[in-house]
Image (cartoon, helix red, strand yellow):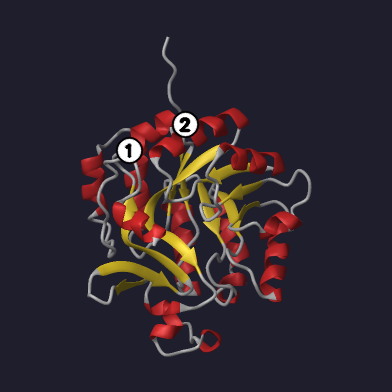
Amino acid sequence: MTTETKSPALVMGPVLFNWSADRLSDFYARVADEAEVTRVHVGEVVCSKREPFFADRLPDAIERLTRAGKTVVVDALALPTLKRERQLVKDLAGLDGVEFEINDMTPLAHLGPGRRFAVSPLVNVYDEGTLGFFARRGAWSVALPYELPMSSIERLAAEGNRLGVEIQVHAFGRLPLAISGRCYHARIHGLAKDSCQFVCNKDPDGLEVDTLDGEAFLSINGVQTMSRDCVAVLDECERLIAAGVGAFRLSPHDCDMIAVAAVFRARLDGRISAEEARARLGETGLKVPLGTPMMSGVWPATATSAARA
């Protein structure tokens, strides 16, 4: 007797870049109507100064996505420092009727007993003890940190299945490596953070930066440092699914994300090979360099070396 492996969920993560309100509205409308994803994240993660531009449209986006049968998860800010930022996180944590994802530990102080929440890959869940802590606090899904090797993913996926917590991995997009109090985009343009003029909106996928020797290195997104390349977890899908990983997250970029979702859905369902999936991704209009395959069981060397730096 054989046991059929359940096909994992495909998740559209939050938009990390500074897209206009009109573009975000159009994006979520297309995701609602066309994307082969079961779950969609909304909300500002990187910079609180961007949040007001879409705040009045967010309820409509949530309603449309929900009506289309998608589960909506609202994300909190990753590095709340100012009083208004902490209040924003508190308000989001208090929302009823929607799922909620934490991007740092701040929201835990505002989550009452029994309040379900998801944990983003920006929170360091490296071992079974930490995973157990979040499970006891009410976590139903934990997206693992970007730099974990395959052996750690397999161990945490097994523990997540034992605890009844979904384990999720980042499957597509530039890897967020760090968030700072300093705005790199503003500094490059000779501006202060408080008067940044929202120049990060000029780079819908982030801005690539080189070393002093002119070698390709990283990319920046306002206060966020990211990998240069776009990760596409295609070669290791079977092993990750067999390990018990329950969800694969796509990070939205300036390309046809509906087509990206279709590629990953077909790959996760075993309908296409990794090679065919990679070829199809090349037809989505992706402007970010596509990283090398995960042949060694860890994230691409360009990303992990940058993370250690």
The image shows residue 191 at horizontal and vertical percentages of 46, 89
Residue found at x 24% / y 48%: 278
Residue found at x 55% / y 52%: 120
- Identify the element where label 2 is drawn: loop
Give the residue at the far top of this rendering. Answer: 1
What is the quadrant of residue 90 in the picture? Answer: bottom right
Q: Quadrant of the N terminus?
A: top left
Q: Nearer the viewer, residue 130 or 240?
A: 130
Q: Residues within 10 Å of mark 1 (few under 14, many from 20)?
A: some
Q: Quadrant of the C terminus?
A: bottom left
The answer to whether 114 is drawn above or below residue 46 in the figure is above
What is the quadrant of residue 298 in the picture? Answer: top left
The image shows residue 69 at horizontal and vertical percentages of 55, 46
What's the mark number on residue 244?
2
- Give, as a three-letter code, the residue at label 2: Gly
- Identify the element where label 1 is drawn: loop
